[in-house]
């Protein structure tokens, strides 16, 4: 009888562990998968490419995430820090890390220093989606770009702001 109770407890424990693992695992999978199911660029971001093509130089470089960079490069031939053929550039891992840092840092000065290091002319700031710079989906700390000592707002619509690096 004791042996039967022990086996029953083991089975119930195993079932409980499996249920908890499955519940947590599915929630985690959904959390990580949701950004991939949303649009990776918005209509407003697409619309901004007309302004970019008309108001920037073909040699201008842009801070953007991978998807924004692909959009900018594909529609305007401007050069993004990541996206497009950037993976063939020297040290793409540093580009991804620093691009993510530009978006995530709280410091306008730190973001500006990285922009200058990469000779970036503009910062592309999506307002209604997370960005993907190569290490996972992140939210942008956008308020630092309002610091006019470092960045000048040049274009804005409901989905994106574009700042010129001062």
Image: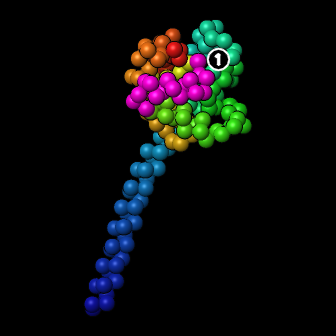
Q: State the image quarter where residue 23 is shown.
A: bottom left
Q: x, y (%) of residue 135?
A: 53, 42
Q: State the image quarter where residue 51 is shown.
A: top right
Residue 153 vertical position relative to residue 101 in the rendered view, above or below: above
Q: Which residues are magenta?
A: 105-121
At a point 31% along the width and 90% down the height, the residue shown is 3
At a point 69% along the width and 37% down the height, the residue shown is 90
Foreground of the two, 141 or 71: 141
66 in magenta: no
At a point 34% along the width and 83% down the height, the residue shown is 7
Residue 37 visible, this orientation: no
Q: x, y (%) of residue 19?
A: 37, 63
Q: x, y (%) of residue 147?
A: 41, 17
Q: Say which residue label 1 marks.
A: 60
Residue 2 vertical position relative to residue 83 in the rendered view, above or below: below
Residue 13 vertical position relative to residue 58 in the rendered view, above or below: below
Q: x, y (%) of residue 141?
A: 41, 28
* Residue furthest to the top: 54
Foreground of the two, 33 or 49: 49
How many numbered dots are placed on residues in this image?
1
């Amino acid at each position: 009888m004791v042996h039967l109770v022990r086996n029953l407890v083991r089975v119930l424990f195993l079932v409980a562990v499996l249920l908890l693992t499955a519940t947590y695992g599915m929630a985690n999978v959904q959390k990580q998968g949701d950004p991939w199911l949303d649009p990776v660029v918005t209509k407003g971001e697409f619309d901004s490419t007309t302004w970019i093509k008309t108001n920037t130089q073909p040699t201008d470089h842009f801070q953007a995430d991978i998807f924004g960079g692909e959009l900018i490069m594909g529609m305007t031939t401007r050069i993004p820090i990541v996206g497009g053929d950037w993976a063939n550039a020297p040290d793409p891992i540093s580009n991804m890390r620093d691009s993510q840092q530009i978006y995530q840092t709280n410091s306008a000065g730190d973001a500006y220093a990285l922009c200058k290091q990469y000779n970036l002319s503009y910062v592309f700031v999506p307002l209604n989606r997370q960005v993907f710079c190569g290490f996972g989906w992140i939210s942008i700390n956008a308020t630092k770009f309002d610091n006019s000592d470092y960045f000048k707002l040049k274009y804005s619509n409901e989905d994106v702001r574009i700042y010129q690096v001062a």
